[in-house]
Amino acid sequence: MLSRSRKAILWLSLGLTFLASACATTPYTGRKQLIMVPQGSEISMGYQAFKDAKRKFRLSQDPEINMMLTRVGQRIAAAAHRPDFRWEFAVFQDDKMANAFCLPGGKVGVFTGILKYTKDEAGLATVVSHEAAHAIARHAGERMSQGLLAQAGGLGLSLGLGGMNPYAADAIMRAYGLGANLGVLLPYTRTQEYEADKIGLILMAKAGYDPAAALDFWQRMLNEKKDRFQMPQFLSTHPNDENRLKAMRDYLPTASQYYQPQGN
C-alpha cells in the first residue's frame, strides 16, 4: 500500500505529465494555454448545453430581431473560420437579462435585454464577436482544466496533511481553496475577457463591421452602470469597465488592420 508521501508524489507526477501534454495557443494573441479537456468533449458539452438553454428559455418570435442575429452571426462565423463548428443562433425573450453567450461548437444565444445597449447591427456584432471569441479561443476548456487542476492540487495537499491536527488541516485546506480561486481562477477569467475583447475586435473587422463601434457599445454599458456599486477588480471575474475600454482603445489600431467595409 502506498504511503501518503508516495501518493502525493504520484499525483505530482501525473500532474506534470498532464502539463507537458496539454499546451495550446490562442489564435491572434498567441497566449499559451493549458487545456486538458479534449476539444470534441468540449464541443459536445456545448451542444447539449444549448439544447438545455432552448428548453429553459423562451425563444423570441420577433422575425426582425431573429433575422438580424442570423445575418450578423453568419458574418462573424465566416470571419472565425471554424468549419468544424455547427453554428446556430437563437434570440431568447427576456428583456431583463442583458446577456449573451457562445458555447463551444458555435452555439450563440442572445437575450433581448441586451438589445437596448447594442442599438444597431454593429452593436450586436460587438456582442456576438466577443462571445464567439471565447469559443474559438477555447476559454471554456481552459476554465474546466483550471478547475481540474485546482481539485487535483487540493487532493494532493490533503494527502500530505495526514496525521495533522484536523482543525489545522481544515484551515490549510480552506486557505488553499481561497488561494486557488483568487490567485489562479479569477485572474485567468479576467485575462480571458480581455483576450475575447481583442479577438472580438478582429472578428468584427474581418466580418466588415467597424471595430470602433465596439467602443460605443461598451461606453453605453458603462454609462448604465456608472451609478452602481462595482466589485473590486481583483475579486471580479470581469475586468473593470474603464480598464476594459482603455485596453480596447489601445488595441483598436491592430484590429483595424483587418477591417474591410461591407454593406451592413
Image: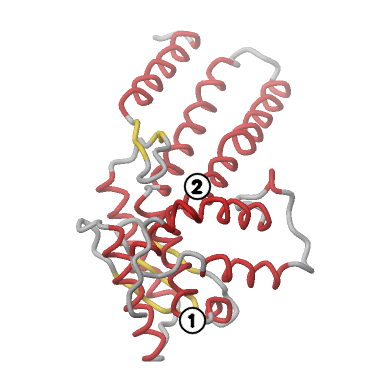
In the image, which is nearer the foreground, mark 1 or mark 2? 1
List x then y, in percent, for residue 73: 34, 71
- Residue 205 is left or right of residue 194, and the answer is left
In the image shown, does 260 or 75 lie closer to the viewer? 260
Secondary structure of the residue carrying numbered label 1: loop
Q: Residues within 10 Å of mark 1 (few under 14, many from 20)?
A: few
- Report the amino acid beneath label 1: Asp
Q: Residues within 10 Å of mark 2 (few under 14, many from 20)?
A: many
Residue occupying the far left of the picture = 83
Which colouring convention does the figure follow? secondary structure
Q: What residue is rendered at 43% in x and 58% in y? A: 256
| Figure quadrant of residue 259 | bottom left
Q: What residue is rendered at 31% in x and 62% in y? A: 106
Mark 2 = which residue? 192
List x then y, in percent, for residue 254: 45, 51
| Figure quadrant of residue 65 | bottom left
| Figure quadrant of residue 18 | top left
In contact (CB < 8 Å): disc 1 and disc 2: no
List x then y, in percent, for residue 41: 28, 48
Secondary structure of the residue carrying numbered label 2: helix
- Report the amino acid beneath label 2: Gln
Between discs 1 and 2, the one toward the N terminus: 1
List x then y, in percent, for residue 140: 42, 49
In the image shown, does 118 or 50 lie closer to the viewer? 118
Mark 1 = which residue? 120
The alpha-carbon separation of the residues under discs 1 and 2 comes to: 26 Å
Image height check: is 194 above or below 1? Answer: below
